[in-house]
Image (tube, rainbow, N blue to C red):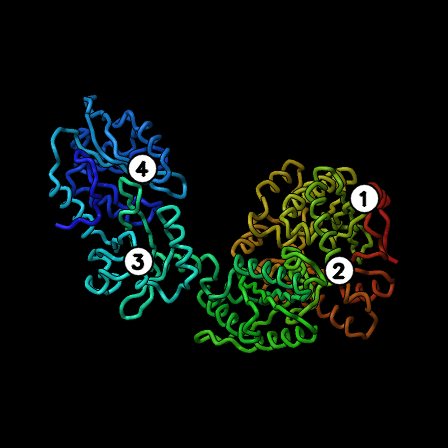
Amino acid sequence: MTTPLLPESLDSDLPNLALLPMGPSDRSHLLALLRLGDFAQDAFLATDTYGTIVYLNRSAERLFGYRHGSAVGLPVHALLPDIQDINHRLNQDSSRETLLWRGQGCSRQAQALQLAGAATHISALSGRSHLYVMRPRRTGSLDADRQAEIAALVYRNTSEGMLVLDSKGFILDVNPAFVSLRGRAQSDVVGRHVRCLNSPCHDREFYRTMWRSVMETGCWQGEHWGQHVNGELYPEWLSINTSFGDDGEVHRRVMIFSNIAEIKQAEAIIWKQANFDRLTDLPNRQMFHDRLEQSIRKARRAGGRIGLLFLDLDRFKEINDTLGHAMGDDLLKEAARRISACVRQSDTVARLGGDEFTVLLDDIHENRDIQRLTDAILKALSQPFNLGVETVFISTSIGVTFFPDDATDAETLLNNADQAMYSAKADGRNRSHYFTSSMQERAQTRMRLVNDLHLALDQQQFSLVFQPIVDLHGGRVAKAETLLRWHHPVRGLVSPAEFIPLAEETGIIRALGDWVFHEATSQVAQWRSQFDQDIQISVNISPAQLRHEGLDLPSWASHLAHLGLLPQHVIVEITEGLLMDSDDERIRQQLEAFRQTGVRVALDDFGTGYSSLSYLRKFNIDFLKIDQSFVANLHSGSADHALCEAIILLAHKLGLKVVAEGIETADQYALLAQAGCDYGQGFLFSRPLAAPAFEALLSSQADLRP
């Protein structure tokens, strides 16, 4: 039997291992060879980089007295006490990958074993692991035929293609796996020079570098394109190792070929999943950031200009919640297709998440090019979306920024485009907006204000003022609306229109609303006791207070009971927009809870929203507040006069009381009183007052009618 894998000068007492695949590879051919070890009579033992046993074949388990993998996980020195000496000797001679050795072993029963074998180190990413093959040492020559049979078994049955070269590079033998991989018969390659296997995918310099490494170090490994006899190319992992004779000259070289096409396909799938959005097949946030960084570097070198568009679909959440997520997904896929159809092939369209998209534009010369593109995108997305049996319409808001005009780094550019997009939404949506430096200033001011807002409540920077609500027919103060004021230590008095939206966005509104309720009700309890007057306190409720965790109504009720107040002594003011949100289950439950507890409800700014009249009965509203925009231009015979009369008549027919806001003149008062309006508030009667001034007004018992 011919065994070209075996050296001619091995010690007759040792296993023939010198040309097992000992090169620095942690590829699958090692695992295949180890699995074949289960059929060998010699003992195979493998360790990881930490010296922990990871594999014993059946012969090794019998030799050391272990069964069923029970030695896996033990330190190797438990079986081979002098293994450190062996490894040290192996590492000393860097020119050899394999060491023949004799030494002692230790069985599970602590019996000393005299062993002869071979050791090899295997380079891996994390260090060096080792493979040891051994048998009990005994005198006399070994059965060379049996050794050849074992080596041939490994050589012929491994799944990796193997071929053996002589020192000149001519092919001496190939195994069946190589014939299967390349589709070339053994007779077609044996006797020919190995260069006959060169791939057209690699140039001469590639092979010169490869063989230079083999000549200098004895080994090489790396990715290589193999070619089947039918011309098909496939990726493979190629390892080349060298066997040296006793004289130090090259005896044989072994090449091992592993088809890694499936590994490459799996890597490609993993890479795509990590870099592309699964729904739209567009680059995702990670890929977008990589391309943006590359574009910035390229533009910086060439002195070029980049455009960045940030798109947010208007009304997408409404469609997604109403028609379902499947319809929403279809809309996003179609929106992605339409946006991509508007841009150049060299541009990048990405989906950052949700309904947010970006467009990255290289080599921008004129702003009008950007304007044409944004107009095209706005037009494309305004066309109807046919989603099965449903047809829906959306629009988009687009923010635009430029490198290096507005910023020179990726993060700032993206923030700028985001801010410009929100400005487009604020301007009415379905439009584009270019970033300006004033946006950055507003964003920084907003950020600082949010930070200060988190500290304001604990630092007692808030206070309450109270605006009287007057009985228009008796002229006396009947109620008080609570208004919140923030006294910033640096900026002074901050407008509620500025900080209330921030409190709603950040969630601070819930704690702030609880504080306002407790302070306001404590104050009205004191006034009712002090002046023996049946006065109600009115507190504004933000829609954000009813979402998420909602109001802590049991705590509110407990606080009222502690103060000796009845629920009807408190009025909560809500907006028409909140009624529109009543389809939200949590908000609906909160509104119904007001009715059940007896707390009175006032509908603020009536006439400016979109609420259906059915909501007035559905939620048991007690008061309508006519918005001050109708009162401001009120004069006899005007349209506003007619509207106010109609609102008052409607409310009274429904059993509701009416409060007119913003009364500033005696004529406004007279017209509203004649129309039957119940209550009014405004500068005609009083500006909002701090608690001591409000107490003085109550104590005066003044008639505030003009």
* Pointer 4 or 2: first along the chain: 4
Say if residue 667 shows up in the picture.
yes
Mark 3 or mark 2, which has the lower sequence index? 3
Residue 159, x across and y down, in percent: 23, 54
- Return the disc, 1 or 2, that comes first in the chain's sequence: 2
Label 4 sits on what residue type?
His
What's the residue type where badge 2 is placed?
Ser
The furthest residue to the front: 247
Choose the circle earlier in sequence order: 3 or 1: 3
Q: Nearer the viewer, mark 3 or mark 1?
A: 3
Residue 259's disc is 3
The first of marks 4 and 3 along the sequence is 4
Q: Are marks 4 and 1 in contact (CB under 8 Å)?
A: no
Cα distance in 3D space between marks 4 and 3: 24 Å
Q: Earlier in the sequence, mark 4 or mark 1?
A: 4
Disc 1 target residue? 490
Residue where numbered disc 4 is placed: 130
Q: Are marks 3 and 2 in contact (CB under 8 Å)?
A: no
Q: Amino acid at mark 1?
A: Val
SS type, badge 2: helix
In 3D space, how far apart are the residues under numbered discs 4 and 1 (Cα atoms)? 70 Å
Q: Residue at x 83, y 65 (%)?
A: 668
Element under label 3?
strand
Gap between marks 4 and 2, in whole Å? 63 Å
In the picture, residue 443 is in which quadrant?
bottom right
Tell me the amino acid under the disc marked 3: Asn
| Image disc number at residue 437 | 2
On screen, 676 above or below 568? Answer: below
- CB within 8 Å, label 1 to label 2: no
